[in-house]
Amino acid sequence: MRILLVDDDAELCSLLGEFLTREGFEVECQHEGNRGLERASADGVDLVVLDVMLPGLDGFEILRRLRQRSKVPVIMLTARGEDVDRIVGLELGADDYLPKPFNPRELAARIRAILRRYAPRPAAPPARLEVNGVVLDTGTREVISIGKPVDLTTFEFDILELLMRSAGRVLSRDALMENFYNRKATAFDRSIDMHISHIRKKLGRGDGLIKTIRGVGYQFCRTPEDAAAE
């Protein structure tokens, strides 16, 4: 798998490149925003590790433009304690984030967890789920809500599929985090919450489909009545 590191810290890129190469990845580094966007948009890149602070284009602008043309998975590197950066990155379509400084093994683990979600799946008979006005086709990976097509990222589609298959049951944040990121949820990790917020907005029905169960997790409502129930 080819990993693109976009960070202006050449020494950090060199160290991460050596480590990830030993872990079995092919690594390319870019240190400037415009060049980073150009390479991230090209074929052959399986995942992008993207720093926020860059010369030329910053990481947020790169991610915004990249999401207009590509669904390549992205892990944002943010300054420790900068919650706003993490939220903005997820809002713009990042799959995950990692605060600096970090252990390279943690980065490798997160890369593998995300790549597993994006790995091609064995061919299976087309399956169609229809719950509470939402139609999800696992064969074509298309989603329709209230008769209108919905454009979801690969990650968002997988989350929605799991929620719909579990419609009526509450899925905990821990269960969702372990399924998609292979780690437990923490009090400050908003990755799953932000992805579900994006799904809600794209489906166009607010909390009427995916209900937050405070302190526990999320529930996909089988009927409008489920959404109103406490």
Image (spheres, rainbow, N blue to C red):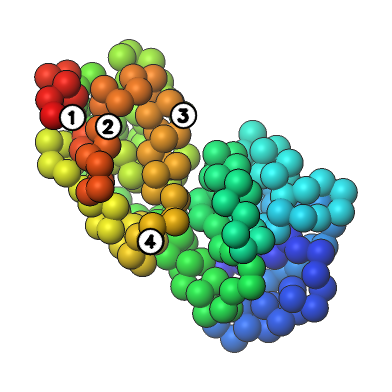
Q: Which amino acid does label 4 sit on?
A: Thr
Q: In this view, does 216 lie above or below 153?
A: below
Q: Closer to the camera, 17 or 86?
A: 86
Q: Is residue 130 left or right of residue 22?
A: left
Q: What residue type is labelled 2?
A: Ile
Q: Is residue 69 visible?
A: no
- Find out whether the residues at labels 2 and 1 contact each other: C-beta distance under 8 Å: yes
Residue at the spot 28% in from the left edge and 58% down from the top edge:
174
Q: What residue type is labelled 3?
A: Asp
- Report the mark closest to the observer, 3 or 4: 4
- Report the mark closest to the observer, 1 or 4: 4
Q: Earlier in the sequence, mark 1 or mark 4?
A: 4
- Find out whether the residues at labels 2 and 3 contact each other: C-beta distance under 8 Å: no
Q: Which of marks 4 and 2 is nearer the N terminus?
A: 4
Instruction: Tell me the quarter of the picture where residue 167 sits.
Output: top left
Q: In this view, does 24 lie above or below 150?
A: below
Which quadrant would the N terminus be assigned to in this image?
bottom right
* Residue named by callout 2: 210
Residue 112, horizontal then vertical, whole percent: 46, 68
Q: How far apart are the alpha carbons under marks 2 and 1?
A: 6 Å
* Residue named by callout 1: 221
Which quadrant would the C terminus be assigned to in this image?
top left
Q: Earlier in the sequence, mark 3 or mark 1?
A: 3
Residue at the spot 45% in from the left edge and 42% down from the top edge:
194
Residue 151, label in figure: 3
Q: How far apart are the alpha carbons under marks 3 and 4?
A: 29 Å
Q: Closer to the camera, 42 or 225?
A: 225
Q: How far apart are the alpha carbons under marks 3 and 1?
A: 21 Å
Residue at the spot 31% in from the left edge and 14% down from the top edge:
146
* Residue named by callout 4: 186
Q: How far apart are the alpha carbons under marks 4 and 2?
A: 21 Å
